[in-house]
Image (tube, grey):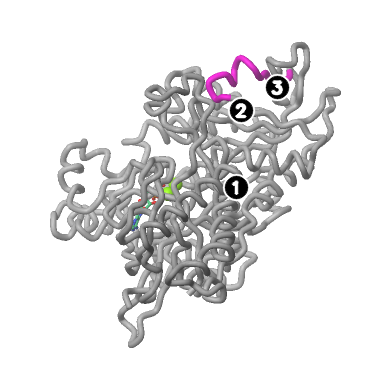
Amino acid sequence: MSGITGAAYPPSLSAAETEHLVNTIKDWSSAHGLVVRPPPTVIAASADPKAIAAVPAPVTLFPSPFPRQCFAQALGVQTTYNELYAAVSRNEEFIEDTVKQVIEGDEFIKNLWAIHQKVKAEGYTQSLSLGIFRSDYMVHQDDTTSSPTFQAKQVEFNTIAASFGGLSYYTSRLHKYLSTREYPLLGNAIPTDMMELPGNDSIPGLAAGIETAFYAYPASELGHTNCILFLVQDGERNVFDQRHLEYRLAETVPQVPLFRLNVSVIRTQTSLADTPRRQLLYHPPQCPGKTYEVAVVYLRGMYDPSDYPDQDAWDARHHIERSAAIKCPTVLTQLAGTKKVQQVLATPQPASEPSVLGRFVKAAAPDQVAELAKTFTNIYPMDTSPAGLEARKKALDPTLAEAYVLKPQREGGGNNVYRGAIPAYLRSIPKAHWSSYILMELITPPPVSNLILRNGSVEQGGVICELGIYGTCLWDQKTDEIYHNELAGYLLRTKGDKSEEGGVAAGFGCMDSCRLV
Ligand code: ADP
Ligand code: MG
Ligand code: MG
């Protein structure tokens, strides 16, 4: 038995069985919206010049085995994590302190911080804040005990544009369908009772967070109808993932208008009311003369420097931030999600000093703080503190660097530097910028094998799984009050074990679900 896979899992398939499973998945995925838009290069080369096509999202043929204690562990800490990040967002001094440690080499973070300061100077007019969070984990195998134990170790915590809740809901259902209709028919049949597939309520969970925030916003004093606004990126391929949340809201709150707005037209299609509250007003071009008041603005973009090609884009973010709409997230919450904050939270304090975590998770008993701490892995600053200098030494040594990943303050995949590439990368950038990074120990999950269906072809081999747990939280920045704090389902993303990055959107990873073992 290798790692956590079990000898006969996934079962070996005949060519006819593989073809049959592929056809079954292709149809199920299209029928249920487990799809993405094809890349622009594919559209350009195809007979689909108007880009109407959608293609099945890459997905595993079988749900990957995942240790049940790690799954339970990750679910068990989510609402404490929600509380922690709500508290971090409220603690401006703490965020300022971490931001100051990275801004010398990071113009992007500097600009975000500047927006917060500008809005703070004139006064925020909305104290409610919505978090749609996703805490990501990999399984760590502890070989130091007599029988190996598994622990969920946090890769990162996402506070902006945490995606795939729409598609992960359907991936769980696809694997459930296959486990009842197809796997029992295979030559190497998998009995249904071997397939313990946990439920996944990501779509209703995430939509409930948005709905709660909508109802926390008062009726329009200006006589408009309140609406929900999704801010989305130009050329977004993962649009159906977002649409699933929208369609859920269309069922639960059909009377609430919901619009999608491209980040590049924020300034032309929205305005701020000339009132002390600065309500965000949306003027849909398809409804001339009509104005809606935006109660909740959900950002599925604006997390990456490429979302800010010019000053207009930064002005647009400032415009959103100073409005009365409930933001998901605010600039402060976005900044709370930086890798630098994660590093500071994960750094153990000397016994003589109060725990950083304890400062934030105040409602929690010490054992909840201890449970959070169990999910941490070693993360080091890259600054000139004694710990930072020690980390720099490791990062510059080609042998020692093999155990680490170097991360800048970025989101969305494709920004990290791995292992042996770290020393040369560091030497290629100004030394004054090194403090803008953190150095994190690589988590090496036990080997798992699976088959990945991508663009109609099946790849088989060793895979690495990353579990994401969604949480939603609505809190008041001023009063510390938390109005809503919920778990909201999960995501399992899987990549080939030769790939370093795992983002599905970035093209290296695929959708998966958990088979608890
Ligand atoms: P991003 O915000 O860009 O998604 P992540 O911190 O999630 O940044 O890193 C991107 C990917 O890199 C992860 O999905 C994972 O595959 C890999 N990765 C990041 N940190 C680690 C780690 N400590 N151990 C192993 N893999 C990691
Ligand atoms: Mg991230
Ligand atoms: Mg990530």
Instruction: Give the left or right position of residue 183, taking residue 391 as reference.
Output: right
Closer to the chain start, of discs 2 and 1, is 1
Circle 1 packing at 10 Å, graded few (<14), some (14-19), many (20+), is many
Name the residue located 69 percent from the left edge and 20 percent from the top edge: 272
Magenta run includes residue 264: yes
Nearer the N terminus, badge 1 or badge 3? 1
Residue carrying label 1: 132
First in sequence: mark 2 vs mark 3: 3
> Which residue has dot 3 on it?
282
**Of helix, strand and loop, which one carries label 2?**
helix
The answer to whether the beta carbon of the residue marked 3 is less than 8 Å from any atom of ligand 2 is no
Label 2 vs label 3, nearer the camera:
3
- Identify residue type, mark 3: Tyr
The secondary element bearing badge 3 is classed as strand
Which region is colored magenta? 262-273
Gap between marks 1 and 3, in whole Å? 22 Å
Q: Position of residue 88 (x, y in %)?
A: 55, 51
On screen, residue 3 versus residue 266, left or right, reads: left
Tag shown at residue 320: 2
Q: Nearer the viewer, residue 292 or 41?
A: 41
Q: Quadrant of residue 44?
A: top left
What percent of the width, then of the height, locates residue 36? 50, 38
**Marks 2 and 3, Cα distance to the nearest angstrom?**
11 Å
Image-based side of 120 in relation to 492, left or right: right
Residue 317 within the magenta-colored segment of the rendering: no
Q: Residue furthest bottom?
A: 146
Of residue 56 and residue 444, the one placed in the foreground of this image is: 56
The answer to the question of whether label 2 and label 3 lie on touching residues, with beta carbons closer than 8 A, is: no
Q: Secondary structure at mark 1?
A: strand
Q: CA distance from mark 2 to mark 1?
A: 17 Å
